[in-house]
Image (cartoon, helix red, strand yellow):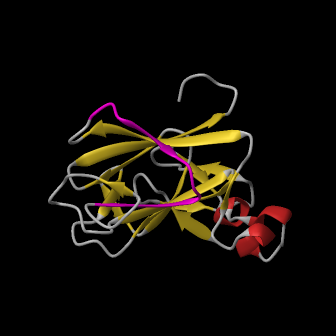
Amino acid sequence: MSMTCSRCGSDVPDDGQSEVTCPKCGAPQPNPAWTRPYAQAGTPTLESRKSDQGSLSAGKKYALVIVNGAEPGRVVPLEKPRVVIGRADCDLVLSDPELSRQHALVAINGMNARLEDLGSTNGTFVDDKRIQAVELRDRSEFRIGSHELVFVMRDRDEDNV
């Protein structure tokens, strides 16, 4: 079985490890079977029983940092496990005519985070490649409209995001 590199689109052989490296560009690739939340894998946990919408880890804090766009440098703490981003009627409203009203979703389940495009007109991009859904890691960058954002996950006891 193989998977597709999230950076360059090359085929990456799945050797059953939790993380493999793309042979073409060297980008680390999480194995979907290992990064899928327990609830999706069919293994119930105490966290997944609390909510089918995901959950924030008590020892972590999460944020989005706007790198480019209307408010560069703005840090947006993520206080709930599902955050919809767009230009209206959503959790994080960004002033950008290139965004759909509800453009993308960041879904967090403990140590796992996922970025999903919500059927937007102009798309959601990671490394200049249009995506439907992708796993996020600490410092994952993505672009929606004219905004570039970085997902940040830190231990609660760290001072800066």
Q: Is residue 141 above or below residue 52?
A: above
Magenta stretch holds residue 79: yes
Residue at far left of view:
97
Query: In terms of image quadrants, where is residue 39?
Result: bottom right
What residue is rendered at 85% in x and 64% in y? 46
Q: Which residues are magenta?
A: 72-86
Q: Position of residue 27 (x, y in %)?
A: 51, 44
Would residue 70 appear left or right of 12 to someone viewing this image?
left
Q: Name the residue nearer the viewer: 80 or 41.
A: 80
What residue is rendered at 64% in x and 55% in y? 112
Q: Name the residue nearer the viewer: 159 or 16.
A: 159
Total marks in image: 0
Q: Name the residue nearer the viewer: 83 or 144.
A: 83
Magenta stretch holds residue 41: no
- Decide if residue 109 is in sight here: yes
Assign the N terminus to one quadrant of the image.
bottom right
Q: Position of residue 60 (x, y in %)?
A: 68, 40
Residue at far front of view:
89
By secondary structure, the bulk of the magenta-drawn segment is best described as strand
Q: Position of residue 82 (x, y in %)?
A: 53, 62
Query: In terms of image quadrants, where is residue 156?
Result: top right
Query: In terms of image quadrants, where is residue 25?
Result: top left
- Decide if residue 26 is in sight here: no
Would residue 139 appear left or right of 117 to someone viewing this image?
right
Q: Position of residue 161 (x, y in %)?
A: 53, 30
